[in-house]
Each structure stands twice: as structure tokens, then as C-alpha cells.
Image: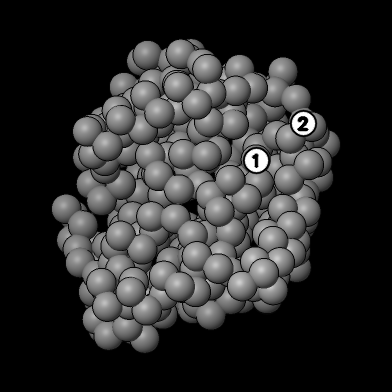
Amino acid sequence: SSCMTALRTRINNLLSDSLRAVLNCGSEHFHFSIFPGSNTGIGKRTAVDLAKRGARVIMACRSRERGERAMEDVKRESGSNNVAFMPLDLASLKSVRNFAESYIKSEQRLDILINNAGLYMEGRTEDGFGLMFGVNHLGHFLLTNLLLQRLKESAPSRVVNVSSVAHNFGHIDFDCLHQHKALGTGNSFRQLMQIYSDSKLCNVLFTHELHKRLQGTGVTCYSLHPGAINSEFDRNMNRVLVLFMKPITSFFFKSPEQGCQTSLHCTLQEALEPLSGRYFSNCTARNVFAKARDDATAKKLWELSESMSGLV
């Protein structure tokens, strides 16, 4: 009906409020950006925007077929040929190490690292970690640390970690991590949602601790909630749940273009350095609950992640 169409238009306009300011930012201060999970959804839209601005974009994805297809899409939509694909499976620490080694050998700069990949799915990684812990946190943690020296050499540079508002419902069960190498052990919908929320809390805590360790290096970092996105995230969900959620997501959720705006803000906005370590939503720094900025928890998670990923 016309009333429903008008309501949808109004909602989309509200969701797009932050878009204009971001699109006015220049890209002269950076040239090289890489990010995992850039073959679909907001990652792909972010890649298109950055490529349009003249950045060299490295799309890091698990599937070579999907990654190369997405790379060609980004080239076509952006009008830039300075886009490349490199294979990266965050569920394999070996793959993460191989990617970092290849990147350092082939590219001289790294101005922006956008840790965009995320999944909602049960299972185990190649190394035996819970899949959501391994992919959503540990793989990104290792990748970032392996590329830190190149980021420092390219300073001023930035690390952008895509988290979620779901982090508000998360907690870190260190006993479970030690015993099961996972954030949780259940496989019901409620339990999996809890584990997903836990992994998103890891992203915010990682950013909090990373900021403390990067002070004085010229590298800054930010975590963010992109908004509820109507994209291909549901391809990892139960099919019955997808059928139930589709009418809701298609009406109320952001498009990938709208959803990538906060990522672009944290990547491009000038004079954002004083807000390093902060959490953003709708292109604005937001306050987080005490558990998401707890120094002791963040340090403990960092040290455990170092051990689990083989950094120490």
C-alpha cells in the first residue's frame, strides 16, 4: 500500500542520515586497504566506495571463486582496476599466516585494515577452536598482529573492526575458552546467539586493548556497529529462520550501501585520531557498557589470544 511504501521510505531516509558527511571525505591520505569478508554485503559495498576514491583495495576472502567474482564486480562498479583478490580463510591460522606473509612480500604499504568478516554458525575451525570465536575474533586478532609492523611503517594508518550492537549481550567465559577452546558449547538458537554476541564483545575488547598498545605509533583503531544489514549474512543461518526473518529484514534493515557508512566513517573521517579505541554506531562514537571497556578483561583476552594463535 502507499502508506507502507511511505513508511519504508521514511525509515530508509532515517537510516541514510549519516551518508552525506561520509561521502564528502577525501582519500588522499591513504592508498592501500585490505579487509577480510569483502566479497558480500557491506564489505563489498565498502570495497566499491574505497576503490572509487582511488585506493588500492585487496579483497581477502576464503572462496577463490566468490572472491574473484566479487573482485570483478567491484572493478566494474567502481571503474577502478586497482583491486586485487588474495585468498584468506580466517578459520585456519595457517591461512592467516600465509596471507600476511604474501601481503608483506607483495605490497609496500598498508594504510587501512578493515576486519569485516563475521559469521553466525556452529562448528570448529581447522585448529579446533569454536567457529565463531576462531573466525570472528581469533583470526582477525592474528592477522592484525602480523600486519602491525607494516601498519606502523605506513602511519598514519587505521584498523577498523566491524563488531555489532550484539556485543552488549556478550560475556567472556574464560573457563570455557580454556576447556573447550570456544566461547560456548551449545547449539540451540539461543545458545548460538549468545556465542555470536560473545564474539562481538571480543571485537570491542580487542579494539580497546589494541588502542592502548598502539599509542604513539601513529596507528589508530576503531570498532563499530554497522546496523542491522539486509545482506547475505543469512546464508549461514538456519533456513527456517531465514524464511521467518526475510520479511522483517527486507523492510526494516539497512541496505549494504547504508550499512557500510560507519565503516567508511571510521576509515576516512579526518581528525578521528583522538577517538581511537572507541566504538561507533551511525558514524558517531558511542559509550559502551563497563564490560566492553574493562582493562583487565581486555588484557586477559589479548594474552589468551596471543597464546592460542601462536604469537607467543
Residue 15, label in figure: none
User: In what element is the residue under mark 1?
Assistant: helix
Earlier along the polypeptide chain: callout 2 or callout 1? 2
Residue identified by numbered label 1: 264
Q: Quadrant of residue 75?
A: top left
Do residues under tags 2 and 1 come within 8 Å of each other at their CB atoms? yes
Mark 1, Cα crowd under 10 Å, few <14 / some 14-19 / many 20+, is: many
Identify which residue is drawn at 32% across, 83% down.
189
Q: Give 107 or 39, whichever is nearer the viewer.
A: 39
Residue 164 spot, x, y in % from top left: 55, 64
Identify which residue is drawn at 29% across, 28% down.
68
Residue identified by numbered label 2: 25
Residue 84 spot, x, y in % from top left: 39, 21
Mark 2, Cα crowd under 10 Å, few <14 / some 14-19 / many 20+, is: some
Amino acid type of disc 2?
Answer: Cys
Position of 189 with respect to 266 (left or right) is: left
Q: Give 301 or 143, whichever is nearer the viewer.
A: 143
Amino acid type of disc 1?
Answer: Leu
Identify which residue is drawn at 41% across, 75% down.
245
User: Is residue 13 in sight in this rendering?
Assistant: yes
